Image (cartoon, rainbow, N blue to C red):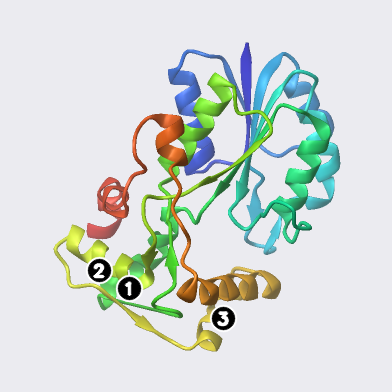
Amino acid sequence: MSFLVVGEPGPISDEVERLLTEAGVPVKRRGLGSAEELRAAAIGCFAVFLDWPYDRASAEYAAADSAVDVVGALAGEGRRFVLLSTHAVRDHEPPASFHGTLELLVRAATADWTALRISMPASITLSWIEQLRATGVVRGPYAQAARTLVDERDVAEVAARVLLDGGHEGRAYYVTGPAALTHADRARILGETFGESWRYQEVPRAEFREQLLSTWSAEHADGILDHMAEQVDNPERPTDVVERITGHPARSLAEWARAHAAAFTR
């Protein structure tokens, strides 16, 4: 009984692979190849974890036009399929994102599917390091936008348990951190964790949009900013999914920061 992890190197896929190996099951690891390559890799596999890669250079999801064929190749009869998805996907709404489309494809391909709709990974905070080291101030929009940042280790643990245990067929889980934190909260907590007086300074949306366009498409950048604006009055709500599935509470931002102390303090 082997497991297939499909995804580029990264904190979630790497940790899923490690946890499955630690559990004593054979694991195959593949990047996003052709449908034929993935179909061959999936032969003999009991379960598949798919983390579809985003190509920052082109500001697009890699090989998005191959999604139908890739999902069809991976979703064999009787094979468990766990998809890493996003909190932006909503039930009973037309898909408004690539992951929304992916979820529909997976649902159509197999009955044994589970979607993990994760909130923003805590590692997004690493993008603040340069500013924090230089000035102790993070400049960005919407200081009071509140998100439930999730530790990637928690996401990986949820994925591993779903892959190994079963009993989660046909479910979409919102996987979040333990609390909704504003940008201002995050800067303060990081400072408290490392004995610094760090803070967040709000800047106009248009100014920050120009920065986003160096990494994301205009559509994606506007979507990020629109979502931030919404979170000012409608903060994300934490769920208990991590605790229900792993048996321990979701890790806090301070816990995540301490695990990455070298990045903040060197």
Q: Are marks 1 and 2 in contact (CB under 8 Å)?
A: yes
Q: Is residue 249 visible?
A: yes
Farthest front residue in view: 92
Q: Picture coordinates of residue 70 (x, y %)?
A: 80, 37
Tell me, yes or no, whether the two marked residues, 3 and 1, touch with CB atoms within 8 Å: no
Q: Is residue 62 above or below residue 69?
A: below
Q: Amino acid at mark 3?
A: Arg
Please give the label number shown on residue 132.
none
- Dot 3 alpha-carbon crowd within 10 angstroms: few under 14, some 14 to 19, many 20 or more: some
Q: Amino acid at mark 1?
A: Ala
The alpha-carbon separation of the residues under discs 3 and 1 comes to: 19 Å
Spatial CA distance of label 1 from label 2 is 6 Å
Quadrant where the N terminus is found in the figure: top right
The residue under label 3 is 209
Q: Disc 2 marks which residue?
A: 188
Q: Nearer the viewer, residue 27 or 166?
A: 166
- Tally the numbered discs: 3
Residue depth check, mark 3 versus mark 2: number of the one nearer the observer: 2
User: Helix or strand or loop: what does disc 3 sit on?
Assistant: helix
Image location (x, y in percent) of residue 145: 44, 73
Q: Which quadrant holds the C terminus?
A: bottom left
Q: Nearer the viewer, residue 124 or 135?
A: 124
The numbered mark, 3 or 1, whose residue comes first in the sequence reads 1
For residue 147, which quarter of the picture?
bottom left
Residue 34 appears in view: no
Question: Could you say which is closer to the camera, residue 246 or residue 193?
Answer: 246
Q: Secondary structure at mark 1?
A: helix
Q: Pointer 1: what residue?
A: 184
Residue at position x 68%, y 75% in the image: 218
